[in-house]
């Protein structure tokens, strides 16, 4: 609603007519009628449906598998799904040995998830997947918003079956990986 409308109606809320335009036809009653009748149920149901729709949209962070990969390893698939379920993560890209997830992708044709350490806005992680050694190496991680570093680590380590481990070869984090290795038994900081 723009400033002119507010001035005209004297109310910051959309008019009854404006609400009617967007009110789903299958609910015969107008929302305000339902509330006036003492039943907030219809409005509640509609709001719940909208909320569910938003949750479903989020669960579909885009997971891309490069064409050269014939079959995705089930552990890599689980890691990808766990990362895609993090609210900030919007893109997951998998190749044979590399799995990258991020809130942002690079510009241009390749659209690579951004995981560069210290990036000013991105939240992302880059992993090297070694099925033969049952290890997943944390190659790059960055978190412009506090709290997401550990969410990404948890998403990866939670996906690993018995006998697998997460590995950090280069620790430039000044304490983050030490904290994570105290928390997770299946994480090795070399
Ligand atoms: C390292 C990084 C990914 C951590 O992400 P984050 O979202 O800030 O981490 P979290 O908030 O999830 O922290 C998880 C835990 O680690 C601790 N932690 C985070 N950074 C820490 C640090 N530098 N020193 C000590 N503890 C640290 C937090 O206090 C928290 O502890 P808790 O579980 O007791 O609450 C982020 O700071 C970053 O992007 N840094 C720049 C890039 C970088 O250094 N990448 C790693 C290269 S090896």
Image (tube, rainbow, N blue to C red):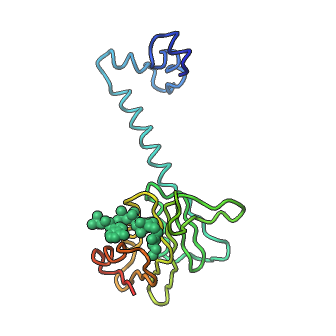
Is any atom of residue 79 visible in this view? no
Viewer-proximal residue among 134 and 153: 153
Task: Give coordinates of residue 165: x percent, y percent.
Answer: 39, 83
Give the quadrant of ligand 1.
bottom left
Whether residue 147 is visible, yes or no, is: yes
Q: Position of residue 147 (x, y in %)?
A: 37, 60
* Image side of residue 31 versus residue 126, left or right: left
Quadrant location of the C terminus in the rendered image: bottom left
Farthest bottom residue? 133
Residue in the image at 42% along x and 40% along y: 51
Residue 90 on image: x %, y %: 53, 57
- Residue 177: image quadrant is bottom left
Residue 110 is left or right of residue 32, and the answer is right
Instruction: Relative to 55, say whether 46 is above or below.
Output: above
Total count of labels: 0
As displayed, is residue 91 above or below residue 73?
above
Q: Nearer the viewer, residue 181 or 157?
A: 181
Most foreground residue, 120 or 83: 120
Q: Residue at x 35, y 80 (%)?
A: 187
Q: For residue 97, which quarter of the picture? A: bottom right
Q: Position of residue 22 (x, y in %)?
A: 53, 25
Tell me what residue is drawn at x 52 percent, y 80 percent: 128
């Amino acid at each position: 609603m723009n400033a002119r409308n507010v001035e005209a109606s004297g109310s910051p809320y959309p008019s009854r007519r404006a609400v009617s335009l967007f009110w789903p036809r299958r609910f015969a009653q107008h929302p305000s009628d339902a509330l006036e009748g003492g039943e907030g149920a219809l409005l509640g149901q509609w709001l719940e449906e909208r909320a569910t729709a938003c949750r479903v949209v989020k669960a579909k962070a885009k997971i891309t598998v490069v064409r050269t990969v014939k079959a995705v390893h089930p552990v890599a698939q689980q890691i990808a799904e766990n990362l895609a379920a993090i609210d900030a993560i919007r893109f997951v890209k998998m190749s044979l040995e590399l799995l990258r997830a991020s809130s942002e992708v690079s510009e241009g044709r390749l659209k690579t998830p951004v995981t560069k350490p210290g990036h000013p806005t991105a939240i992302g992680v880059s992993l090297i997947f070694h099925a033969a050694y049952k290890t997943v190496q944390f190659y790059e991680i960055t978190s412009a918003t506090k709290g997401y570093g550990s969410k990404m680590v948890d998403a990866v380590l939670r996906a690993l079956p018995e006998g697998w481990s997460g590995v950090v070869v280069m620790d430039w984090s000044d304490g983050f990986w030490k904290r994570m290795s105290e928390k997770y038994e299946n994480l090795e900081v070399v």
